[in-house]
Image: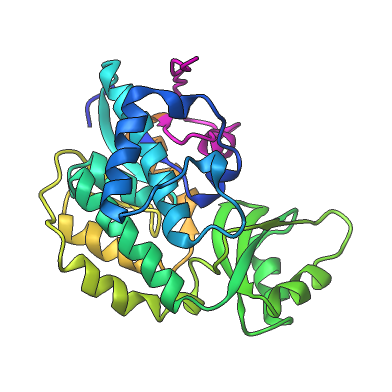
Amino acid sequence: MPKDGVVALFPGQGDVRMAKDGWNRHPIVQEVFREASDIACRPIPAPSDLTPDSPQVERQLSLMAASLGRWEMIRQEGVSIVAAGGISLGEYAAAVVTGALSRADGFRAVLARGRCMDRYARAGNMLAVLGLDTDNLRHALQGVAADAYIACIYGPQHHLVSGTDSALPQVRLRLSQPGIRVVTVPTGIPSHCPLMAAVVPCLYRAFKTLDWRPLSIPWLSGVDGQVTRRVVTVRERLVRQTVEPVHWLHMVHTLRYVHNRVMDIGPGQSVSRLLKNQPGLALIPYRERIMP
């Protein structure tokens, strides 16, 4: 990759809880939201206007539009993007930025993802677990219930756990120990685990209707932290991430050795929080113009 420029990183759905008002009034962002609404045939609200009862289609298209709107703002400022990656839903935005999908087809992919999840995902949610290492967390989950899984590995003692509505209270009780913090992450679905298996065939069918294109810049996978220029790999990883955990630490390791200048494109800046105090990486700030 070129030494100049930055790797664009896009967030997952947790970012909508941190999104701020103001940026969504920018004309470029409003244009992107109109396109998302036209494709969905329904108004797509800004992330700050979502509610706990918002369906997956609205939640996911809202963050996708917010992320791509910010990217359009950054691109107009002349920032050079040399690669793109993301966490969970953010990988779909990265697929657009790298050229694997047009923006319209990116919205269609996320629309299909949301509809497939609304229809086929098992009822459940996610918990953030801090203060327990991966091996001990995995052991604790095995002793609780069959329907709870490590869904994201953000740090040595920072994880997300997905599970059914009946399993997660057991997990919370089991982890009620000094030094361990457990926080609900209201995604509305048990993402990145085998509980999402019924979603996969639905996604495969939807992806066949999209126009997948050769990549113009590399794409970074959240499944294994690998960089690729092969569009078939992008498509396959986007399906795999539905049932496999996010390996954020693998992504960080790759960035250290491939290109260490990174920029958080999400409206809530959750990726910046994950990158804080990561040695070997340079987080490049972006200050968007907030519209009055």
Residue 43: x and y in percent read 39, 48
Nearest the viewer among 27 and 193 is: 27
Task: Provide the residue span drawn in magenta.
Answer: 263-292
Residue 275: x and y in percent read 54, 35
Does 277 lie within the magenta span? yes
Q: Quadrant of the N terminus?
A: top left
* Residue at the bottom extreme, as displayed: 146
Kindly report the secondary structure that dominates the magenta region of the rendered protein: loop
Residue 282: x and y in percent read 46, 25
Left or right: residue 125 compared with residue 167: left
Nearest the viewer among 206 and 240 is: 206
Nearest the viewer among 253 and 170 is: 170
Q: Is residue 40 visible?
A: yes
Q: How many marks?
A: 0
Q: Which residue is rendered at x = 10% and y = 49% of the image?
A: 214
Nearest the viewer among 250 and 28 is: 28
* Residue at the front extreme, as displayed: 42
Considering only vertical position in the picture, is 8 above or below 254?
A: above
Q: Which residue is rendered at x = 47% and y = 58% of the image?
A: 246
Does 58 lie within the magenta span? no
Q: Which residue is rendered at x = 48% and y = 64% of the image?
A: 245
Q: Is residue 220 visible?
A: no
Considering only vertical position in the picture, is 80 above or below 220?
A: above
